[in-house]
């Protein structure tokens, strides 16, 4: 059975990851929290995304451990360590963000935010954003399929090997279509009555489970140990 975390617990983990970046926790605390965040992908059945993000974090962590002790005597390794550390520190925020938005529907997010008494002026943009990126991703896949059909910039490395064609055939259509997608999603949300005044009802009933609370506390523990001087 796949683990479905409450959307409010996901938002808490996203906040926790940003606090971890803000307070600049130790490497040990960061690695433990990153492992706990990555474990959620495997518990929810998104193993492919979990493996990709685990590999990225593992490579960056190994690169930091190798480059940082040698950076003093090499300007090149100093630059490598600088960029790898910066990306590695932001990666837990990306991991929790990807998990939260890829496993939460727009209805669940709206219901969770309304249960937290968040103003409607914040809920409406969030409902649009959570559907914006999957729609743009589908447009990207359709553009790549059309380019492959015409033998234009084929392959996964086409963005690097053919930057001019990628800019002309991928980025420009996506940018032009992004505005239309945002407008269409906003109109669709307003048409369904998301902006109406008064009390809103929902077919989704959210109830935090003991597993949500325990896992949230488990993810908080490394930061508490860091503040206590243990990690």
Image (spheres, rainbow, N blue to C red):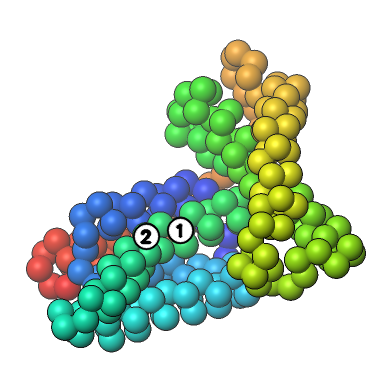
Spot occupied by residue 154 in the image (x, y as percentages of width and height): 77, 70
On the image, the x and y values in percent for residue 206 come to 57, 44
Q: Label 1's element?
A: helix
Disc 1 packing (10 Å; few <14; some 14–19; many ≥20): some
* Vertical relation: 35 (above or below) 22: below
- In the rendered view, does 173 fall on the left or right side of 217? right
Quarter that holds the C terminus: bottom left
Q: Secondary structure at mark 2?
A: helix
Cβ atoms under marks 2 and 1 closer than 8 Å: yes
The answer to whether residue 230 is seen in the rendering is yes
Residue positioned 55% across, 36% down in the render: 126
Direction left: furthest residue = 229
The residue located at (28%, 86%) in the rendering is: 66
Q: In the drawing, what numbered circle is on residue 90?
A: 2
Q: Which residue is mark 1?
A: 94
Residue shown at 45% from the left, 28% from the top: 117
């Amino acid at each position: 059975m796949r683990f479905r975390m409450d959307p409010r617990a996901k938002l808490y983990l996203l906040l926790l990851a940003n606090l971890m970046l803000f307070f600049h926790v130790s490497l040990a605390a960061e690695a433990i929290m990153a492992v706990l965040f990555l474990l959620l992908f495997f518990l929810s059945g998104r193993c492919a995304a979990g493996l990709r993000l685990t590999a990225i974090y593992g490579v960056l962590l190994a690169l930091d451990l190798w480059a940082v002790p040698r950076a003093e005597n090499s300007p090149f390794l100093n630059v490598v360590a600088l960029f790898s550390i910066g990306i590695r520190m932001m990666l837990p925020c990306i991991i929790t963000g990807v998990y939260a938005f890829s496993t939460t529907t727009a209805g669940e997010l709206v219901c969770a935010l309304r249960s937290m008494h968040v103003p409607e002026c914040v809920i409406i943009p969030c409902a649009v954003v959570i559907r914006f990126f999957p729609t743009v991703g589908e447009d990207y896949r359709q553009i790549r399929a059309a380019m492959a059909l015409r033998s234009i910039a084929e392959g996964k490395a086409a963005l690097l090997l053919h930057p001019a064609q990628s800019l002309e055939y991928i980025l420009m259509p996506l940018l032009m279509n992004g505005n239309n997608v945002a407008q269409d999603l906003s109109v669709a949300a307003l048409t369904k009555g998301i902006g109406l005044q008064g009390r809103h009802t929902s077919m989704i009933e959210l109830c935090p489970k003991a597993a949500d609370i325990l896992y949230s506390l488990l993810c908080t523990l490394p930061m508490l140990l860091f503040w206590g001087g243990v990690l």
